[in-house]
């Protein structure tokens, strides 16, 4: 969320002499970092359940692919510019709700025996 917001404000922060990470990296590298973080986030949500049980991992992976993948793919297309900030922040919230929600649902199902 902070990387999204700070990258959208990059030009304004440069003029105000703020030293945020996107200002230090520049727009192109900040966008590359942002996209790498999105991929890492989705991969973590996909792989972490396998650490605990195989059945829970399969259920979580299916939920993520069905419900959360479109939201994460949308995040990768963001340009992180000021005019698009509201839509991009809504996209981050949606990805959090769907990705983490799928993870929590699969965890609850694993605890109650729903995926075994």
Image (tube, rainbow, N blue to C red):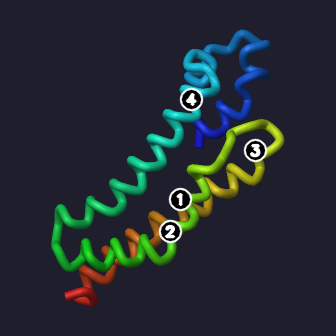
Q: CA distance from mark 3 to mark 2?
A: 21 Å
Instruction: Examine the rendered structure and indicate whether residue 72 appears above or below residue 112.
Output: above
Element on which disc 1 rests: helix
**Residue 10 numbered mark, or none:** none
> Where is mark 3, residue-wise?
85
Q: Position of residue 62 (x, y in %)?
A: 37, 77
Q: CA distance from mark 1 to mark 2?
A: 6 Å
Instruction: Examine the rendered structure and indicate whether residue 34 appears above or below residue 50.
Output: above
> Where is mark 4, residue-wise?
30
> Where is mark 2, residue-wise?
68
Q: Position of residue 52 (x, y in %)?
A: 17, 66
In which quadrant is the C terminus drawn? bottom left
In which quadrant is the N terminus drawn? top right
Q: Position of residue 20 (x, y in %)?
A: 60, 20
**Direction top: furthest residue:** 17
Residue located at (68% from left, 50% from top): 89
Q: Residues within 10 Å of mark 4 (few under 14, many from 20)?
A: many
In primary-sequence order, the first of circles 4 and 1 is 4
């Amino acid at each position: 969320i902070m990387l999204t917001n700070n990258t959208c404000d990059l030009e304004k922060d440069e003029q105000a002499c703020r030293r945020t990470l996107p200002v230090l990296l520049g727009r192109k590298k900040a966008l590359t970092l942002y996209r790498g973080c999105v991929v890492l986030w989705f991969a973590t949500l996909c792989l972490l359940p396998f650490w605990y049980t195989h059945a829970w991992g399969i259920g979580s992976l299916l939920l993520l692919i069905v419900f959360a993948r479109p939201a994460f793919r949308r995040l990768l297309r963001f340009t992180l510019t000021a005019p698009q900030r509201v839509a991009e922040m809504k996209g981050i919230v949606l990805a959090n709700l769907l990705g983490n929600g799928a993870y929590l649902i699969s965890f609850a199902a694993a605890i109650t025996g729903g995926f075994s």
